[in-house]
């Protein structure tokens, strides 16, 4: 695939600061690399220091914070930044279970990471952006499952619908501060999280049969959508969910 940064004229994010929460692997890592190539100074946050070290070696212009997104000190740490223009929140997990079999531990874990943590990071980012007075962009990574339902994914769908609702409401409320809020909602991307599911031939066939384009999305394609929303090209786009789903939700 063509370099995602090359799809826009020059380096549109030069002299900006972008935070990517959940940048260690998969989609978050691809977003951090794409934003850095577009000229942003990227602060990549993840729990695993080794993942961040390899990311920093691979991409220039990336600062790393080894930090759990649920840590109480995250908000104060964001406030130390000299400016904050873009925040990408790539935090989430899944544990597919039939609705009737969902246990409380799974329910609590998914709600805590997929909803509460996303809310807290977005809130901290918005407060920092308001303090700096230059506006900004907040981009939670949602899912096509934030727009539809699917078997064995009631909790995951519920949490991603919540993220979509958060983005819409926050977009309306924060517009007065020049802060835009949009989600990117991908279909299945082969990552560490999805690899065990997609290793099942029957499930993989089910997934591909639901996607009119007939293939999975790539992390680079999701990063390209993030790059667009973070760029000046999307200056009038807020409260929107950009679906990178190969047509899944168009059916």
Image (cartoon, rainbow, N blue to C red):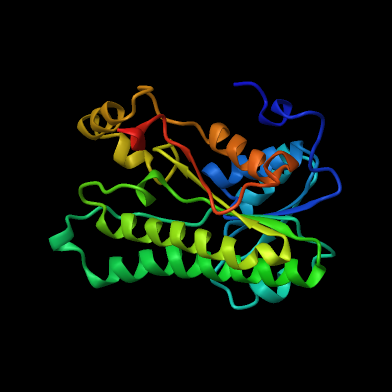
In the displayed structure, would residue 210 be above or below residue 135? Answer: above
* Relative to 86, 147 lies left or right: left
Q: Residue at x 66, y 62 (%)?
A: 175
Q: Quadrant of residue 249?
A: top left
- Residue 161, percent across and down? 38, 57
Whether 215 is drawn above or below 85: the answer is above
Residue 141, given in percent of the width and then of the height, sits at 51, 50
Whether residue 148 sits left or right of residue 137 in the image: it is: left
The one nearer the camera, 165 or 98, is: 165
Quadrant placement of the C terminus = top left
Q: Is residue 35 left or right of residue 188?
A: right
10 left or right of 157 in image: right
Between residue 67 and residue 185, name the one nearer to us: 185
- Count of picture labels: 0
Please tell me which residue is depicted at 58% across the width and 50% down the height of the picture. Answer: 24
Residue 247 percent coordinates (x, y): 38, 30
The answer to which of 37 and 245 lies nearer the viewer is 245
User: In the picture shown, does residue 118 fall above or below 183?
Assistant: below
Q: Quadrant of residue 1?
A: top right
Q: Which residue reaches farthest left?
A: 100
- Residue 19 in percent (x, y) is at 69, 56
Kindly tell me whether residue 44 is visible in this rendering.
no
Instruction: Between residue 163 and residue 219, name the one nearer to us.
Output: 163
Q: Is residue 244 visible?
A: yes
């Amino acid at each position: 695939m063509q370099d995602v940064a090359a799809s826009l004229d020059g380096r549109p994010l030069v002299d900006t600061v972008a935070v990517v929460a959940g940048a260690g692997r998969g989609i978050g890592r691809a977003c951090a690399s794409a934003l850095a190539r577009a000229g942003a100074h990227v602060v990549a946050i993840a729990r695993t220091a080794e993942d961040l070290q390899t990311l920093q070696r691979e991409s220039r212009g990336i600062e790393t914070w080894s930090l759990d997104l649920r840590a109480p000190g995250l908000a104060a740490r964001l406030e130390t930044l000299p400016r904050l223009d873009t925040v990408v929140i790539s935090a989430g997990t899944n544990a597919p279970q039939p609705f009737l079999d969902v246990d409380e531990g799974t329910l609590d874990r998914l709600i805590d990471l997929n909803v509460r943590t996303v809310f807290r990071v977005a809130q901290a980012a918005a407060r920092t952006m308001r303090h700096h007075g230059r506006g900004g962009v907040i981009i939670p990574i949602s899912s096509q499952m934030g727009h539809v339902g699917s078997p064995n994914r009631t909790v995951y769908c519920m949490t991603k619908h919540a993220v979509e609702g958060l983005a819409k409401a926050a977009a309306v409320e924060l517009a007065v501060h020049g802060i835009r809020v949009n989600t990117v909602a991908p279909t299945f991307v082969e990552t560490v999280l999805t690899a065990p599911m997609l290793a099942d031939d029957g499930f993989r066939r089910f997934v591909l049969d639901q996607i009119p384009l007939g293939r999975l999305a790539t992390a680079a394609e999701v990063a390209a959508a993030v790059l667009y929303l973070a760029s000046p090209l999307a200056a009038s786009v807020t409260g929107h969910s950009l679906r990178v789903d190969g047509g899944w939700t168009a059916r």
